[in-house]
Amino acid sequence: MRIDLTGRRALVSGSSQGIGQAIATELARAGASVVVNGRDQDRTERAAEAIAREVPSAELLPVAADLASADGAEALRERAGELDILVNNLGIFGAKPVLEIEDDEWRRYFEVNVLSAVRLIRMYLPGMTERGFGRVMNIASDSAVVTPLEMVHYGVTKTALLAVTRGFAKAAAGTGVTVNSVMAGPTHTPGVEEFVGELVGEELPWDEAQRQFMREHRPYSLIQRLIEPTEIGNMVVYLSSEQASATTGGAVRVDGGYVDSILP
Ligand SMILES: NC(=O)c1ccc[n+]([C@@H]2O[C@H](COP(=O)([O-])OP(=O)(O)OC[C@H]3O[C@@H](n4cnc5c(N)ncnc54)[C@H](OP(=O)(O)O)[C@@H]3O)[C@@H](O)[C@H]2O)c1
């Protein structure tokens, strides 16, 4: 299978670092022109430069916009124009005892992790269905199906994204547009590397620290290592392709087998 996204225009929300940046890189490598996004113009431009170093042929448009608000989404649309591929990657997470999560924080998680995706889908789906092609992907998590006690609010938003995906896939039925969730598992991002260091000790070499972290804290992982962000990018590239035309309304796992279940 050869995937060629030349001529396709993509947006990856929250792509100035981490998984989003890796997704943007892999989409660019497959030939798509990519809108790179974060809240800060400098950081967003630096991410685009890093992608261009890896993929010299990349066509990139860095657009700083805060997608937690409707105004931010509108500002992004003005700069980005129409899209063929929309990747709702933006997501925040952080540990907090569930009894201490106040209304405002529940609302903030819902705004950033769910409504940001809903708004962009509402904006871009009509154009995609009219043109008869489109790919929408929402980056969910293992936490969508196994609610983490240390961040219930986060898990709830990721569960909601699976339903958002199913609902909009139904709205796009028969149009040539697909809408899917990608369930990422524990992934090797700078934030997670720091977290591993805190749990198993900063002094251990990375490979050993990772092995110990997986053995002690993620024993259900079938790959017994963190997922590399590029591996999530590869799945997004596949789902963005013409070849993935019969996959819609579902949740595809890139979790290293972490969720101990046959179905997502
Ligand atoms: N890391 C994991 O192990 C893991 C596992 C499963 C699922 N996931 C999911 O994968 C996605 C990416 O995770 P990550 O770990 O790569 O995240 P991350 O490293 O924290 O990066 C988040 C990105 O979003 C941007 N951002 C934050 N708030 C924004 C806003 N309001 N508007 C626009 N951009 C914003 C950040 O840039 P600025 O701060 O400069 O705005 C940054 O580029 C999330 O949906 C997460 O839930 C992650």
Image: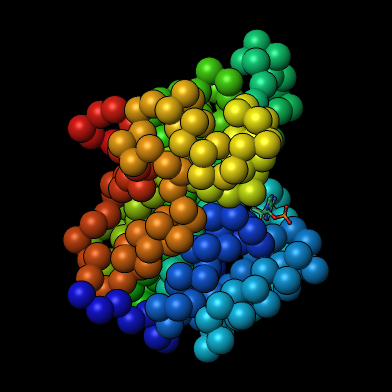
Nearest to the observer: residue 165 or residue 126: 165
Residue occupying the point 22% across, 71% down: 243
Locate the C terminus by quadrant: top left
Nearest to the observer: residue 132 or residue 83: 83
Q: Name the spot of residue 116 as percent of width and height, x first.
A: 59, 50
Q: Name the spot of residue 231 as percent of width and height, x first.
A: 40, 57
Indicate the colouring scheme. Answer: rainbow
Residue 209 visible to an observer of this rendering: yes
- Res 27 → quadrant: bottom left
Residue occupying the point 42% across, 42% down: 225
In the image, farthest residue toward the top: 99
Q: Name the spot of residue 2 as percent of width and height, x first.
A: 25, 79
Q: Up-down: is 128 above or below 258? A: below
Q: Is residue 133 left or right of residue 117?
A: left
Nearest to the observer: residue 167 or residue 53: 53
Residue occupying the point 42% across, 86% down: 7
Nearest to the observer: residue 95 or residue 71: 95
Residue occupying the point 71% across, 28% down: 105
Q: Name the spot of residue 52 as percent of width and height, x first.
A: 60, 80
Q: Up-down: is 122 above or below 108? A: below
- Res 253 → quadrant: top left
Residue 141 visible to an observer of this rendering: no
